[in-house]
Amino acid sequence: MLFNDRTDAGKQLAARLRFLQGQPNVVVLGIPRGGVVVAAEIARALNAPLDVFLAHKLGAPFNPELAIGAITSTGEVLLDDLLIAELRLSHKDIEREIEHQRQEIARRVAVFRKNRPPLDVQNKTVVIVDDGVATGSTMLAALRALRQAQPARLILAIPVGPPDTIQRLEKECDQVVVLAMPEPFWAVGRFYTHFGQTSDEEVIALLAEQASSTRRHPA
């Protein structure tokens, strides 16, 4: 195992991101739910504001685990046109899944943020974090959506991912900080001793804790 749990992975990533300490206008974004636990350790170490960035996989109608694309909370939709053609999915099938995930994202944004507006990322150094990547389709959509928001610098920070996925994601951001790129690559959870589900309540608590901390100790 590479990591004890997500907190351990976050602390290891934070150590690799020390070059951002003391820099102004750093924002840390976590992909819920597990990515927020990792991101919280980074935000704490950098004394930076923490927010969620939601990106959901779009699943095939007959197999929700098979990703035919992804959608983000800012409305960015990324589709795997080759796979969609191969599966002979109809426009109606795709639109139904997009609408379903759009509603789920809106629900989760309301749960996590309450009435807080999203953090402004324009002209900021943005660190986007997850607990790992496999195919990278969800993170690809997130990076493209964030790029449209015009950050000064876009950094992807992840504990673990396969080399080919990392290589693809490197083209979508300014820098990738990754702790391990094992081959062969299995599921992300195989590289953690403890990889249980993260609850909505845990995400809400981490966001509130970091918001309170950055108010008390502004960077």
Image: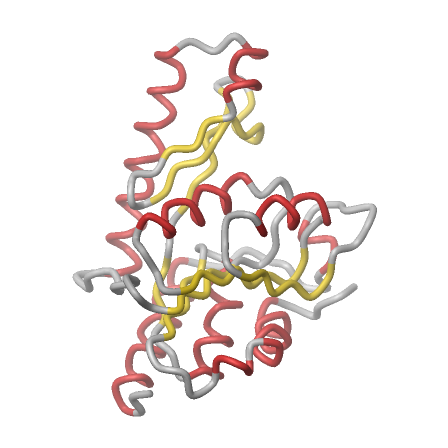
Which quarter of the image is occupied by the N terminus? bottom right
- Identity of the residue drawn at 39% across and 58% down: 200
Q: Is residue 188 above or below residue 217?
A: above
| Farthest-out residue, left | 115
* Residue 13 shown left or right of residue 145 in the figure: right
| Quadrant housing residue 70 | top left
Query: Which color scheme does this rendered protein use?
Result: secondary structure
Q: Is residue 19 above or below residue 144?
A: below
- Identity of the residue drawn at 51% across and 76% down: 41
* Residue 80 shown left or right of residue 185 in the figure: left
Which quarter of the image is occupied by the C terminus? bottom left
- Identity of the residue drawn at 34% across and 38% down: 76
**Observer-nearest residue: 53 or 141?**
141
**Observer-nearest residue: 54 or 165?**
165
**Observer-nearest residue: 87 or 192?**
87
| Quadrant housing residue 199 | bottom left
The percent position of residue 48, horizontal first and vertical second, equals 38, 78
The percent position of residue 63, horizontal first and vertical second, equals 56, 23
* Residue 21 shown left or right of residue 181 in the figure: left
| Quadrant housing residue 17 | bottom right
Counting every numbered tag in the picture gives 0
| Farthest-out residue, right | 184
The percent position of residue 185, horizontal first and vertical second, equals 77, 47
- Identity of the residue drawn at 73% across and 61% down: 180
| Farthest-out residue, bottom | 217
